[in-house]
Image: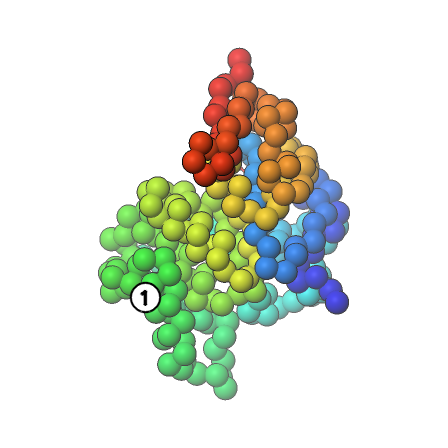
Amino acid sequence: MSPLLEVVAASRMAQGRAIVSDISLRLQPGEMLGLLGPNGSGKSTLLGMMAGLIRPCRGQVRLKGLPMQALRRRRIAQLLALVAQSAETAERITVRQAVELGRIPRLGPLRPWRPRDDEAVAAALKAVDMAHLAGRDWSSLSGGERQRAHIARALAQAPRILLLDEPTNHLDIHHQIAILDLIAGLSVTTVVALHDMHHALRCDRVLVMRDGRCAALGPPAQVLTPELIRDIFAVKAEIIPHPRTGRPVFDFERLC
Ligand SMILES: Nc1ncnc2c1ncn2[C@@H]1O[C@H](COP(=O)(O)OP(=O)(O)OP(=O)(O)O)[C@@H](O)[C@H]1O
């Protein structure tokens, strides 16, 4: 059977420069894959390619075995949701209306809005701790509240693949952990671009990018070694087991 999402030797050029180079990847059903890498290493571009928004110059992204460009936007949106880093939303709507937009790919002339759509929207708002703000104007939200509402919109879409670009941006530590717990607990396949290595430890696998290329791919405990971190991020890393939980704790020092 075809994998749900597969990236096959995909590259993307911009202004004569390769910003994603020869990436191949097969998402495992239900896995949480972390994308790590320095600023500008190509994580958002790769996510955009996986979402069908950025077309590879070479290679392919396949959704259920079909090239992205062969699929209609609506079909893609039934299978896949993206929370982009600088997602925009029309200002003059309420939070609930913004989240309701996630249901559009499920609706059609023969499929009107149903109570189950209201339930999906309510569940998505609750999942990101935004139910109490459902009636608020979008324009009045803080950065972190907007981020959580964008995630709720993606959850309301009920995708099989969820792509998230730095979803913990703008979030306080409580909501960072809550969102990561939520993502890790979902049965959908997720790809999440991250900068925090402690967060990356929650992933089943991590893909580390450098200059658009895959520098490493595998379980985080195997991939995120002091040697790799030094090589990719130019920092000295010490990885210490937490005295109570035994979980790895990273300590960083910048290399001159
Ligand atoms: N349309 C474009 N035209 C020219 N350069 C681009 C374009 N889009 C992206 N780039 C460049 O491609 C590189 C990769 O960008 P991308 O946003 O994918 O990186 P990233 O790993 O997500 O970075 P960050 O961690 O800072 O969010 C960057 O150097 C960026 O400036």
Q: How far across and how far down the image is residue 62, in percent? A: 70, 59
Instruction: Identify whether 229 is placed above or below 206.
Output: above
Instruction: Look at label 1 and name its amino acid.
Output: Arg
Q: Is residue 233 above or below residue 52?
A: above
Nearer the observer, 199 or 238: 238
Give the total number of marks visible in the rendering.
1
Q: Residues within 10 Å of mark 1 (few under 14, many from 20)?
A: many
Q: Residue reaching furthest top?
A: 256
Q: Residue at x 64, y 37 (%)?
A: 222
Q: Give percent across and percent down for residue 17.
A: 67, 34
Q: Is residue 112 left or right of residue 239?
A: left
- Residue 183, percent from left and from top: 47, 54
Q: Residue at x 53, y 24 (%)?
A: 238
| Secondary element at tag 1 | helix
Q: Position of 139 compared to 58: left or right?
A: left
User: Which quadrant of the structure image shows residue 114?
Assistant: bottom left
Res 174 visible: yes
> Is residue 209 in sight in this rendering?
no
Of residues 27 and 94, the one nearer the viewer is 27
Give me the residue at 53% from left, 28% from top.
Answer: 239
Quarter the N terminus occupies? bottom right
Q: Which residue is mark 1?
A: 96
